Image (cartoon, helix red, strand yellow):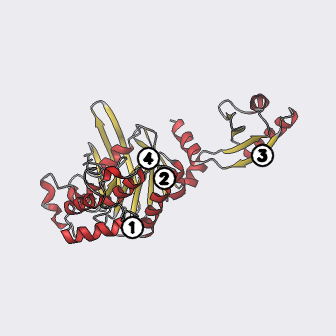
Amino acid sequence: MDEASGAISATVADDATVADDATVADDVAVAEEPAVEATGVVKSFGTVTALRGVDLSVRSGTLAALLGPNGAGKTTLVRILATLLRPDQGTVRVLGRDVATRPYAVRSVVGLTGQYAGLDEGLNGRDNLMLIGRLAGLGRREAAGRAAELAERFGLTAAVGRQVRTYSGGMRRRLDLAASLMNRPALLILDEPTTGLDPASRLELWSALMELREAGTTMLLTTQYLEEADRFADVVHVLDHGMIIAAGTAAQLKARTGTQVVDVLLAGQDAAAATAALRPRVAPGDLHVDEAARRLTIVARDGLATLLAAAEALRADGIGVEDIALRQPSLDEAFLTLTAAR
């Protein structure tokens, strides 16, 4: 079974700290204490430094998104939070427990859904859930009841008796999420949970996640789909080159770019002519053209002035416009601006 599966919370303790962790029944976290508090976290692999002093705080009861380009260090940070890696420097506390000195206590209150479903394909869905539950310390009857409850919750009751190798991608992701919830974790870590899913399966998974959020589960999400972070996250942290370079709500990050966007939809296939008309009035790199869609996008430091200038330039050259509008940048555009600045 994949070490980054939902079973992470059930991993048997592997060091001498278990004795101290016998008091796992203590309160999950003081209400005002962050669910995750990381300070100065450094992690290297040989000559490669993956994390360069990360500071991260996640408030209990919220959904925090962790965004970053490939190689930024997202998965390394997630693995440290889930006790799969130890930091070289810095401190990390999860729900009041130090990941270095109390890993077993951390595992008892954390669920992890990795980038790929960590399931035994030779077992059926029910047996996968039962295995995770038993490893988490649940009695056989309690594990069976919890497995049935989660199978129903995620629409898997009809399939739970089938081998996992017969499941669709969406069903595997839902079963993997169910497995990560067997121990009723207070913190759910979601490392790109919708990777590879079709749009319908992504919607199904997010519907289930929103139910958990409404019930008070704290979540930390990494995703390549920035619209998910824009729509669902309470706060967004941008990680680049092993450091948190920005944090705030999606709206705050968009505002940090100091720009707006002018969208132009041409009436005909005049993209080349439109580009030539706009070049003298637009800074290099601020004009983006999609010829197939007949759409031009202009990054605007002075939104209204740029819109009026673009409209006048196109009118003067006799280029038909179906629509022209001024808008705030998307989170994707804000993300690219923030990371490109480095």
Q: Check contact, mark 1 vs mark 2: CB within 8 A.
A: no
Mark 4 or 1 closer to N-term?
1
Residue under label 3: 323
- Closer to us: mark 1 or mark 2? 1
Which SS class for mark 1? helix
Residue 89 at what x, y percent from top left?
28, 44
Mark 2 or 4 closer to N-term?
4
Q: Amino acid at mark 4?
A: Thr
Residue under label 2: 236
Residue 49 at what x, y percent from top left?
33, 35
Count of numbered circles in the view: 4
Mark 3 or 2 closer to N-term?
2
- Closer to us: mark 2 or mark 4? 4
Above-or-below relation of 18 to 51: below
- Is 133 in front, or is 156? 156
- In 3D space, how far apart are the residues under numbered discs 1 and 3 (Cα atoms)? 45 Å
Above-or-below relation of 176 to 242: below
- In 3D space, how far apart are the residues under numbered discs 1 and 2 (Cα atoms)? 28 Å
Residue under label 4: 195
In the rendered structure, the answer to whether residue 231 lies left or right of residue 302 reads left
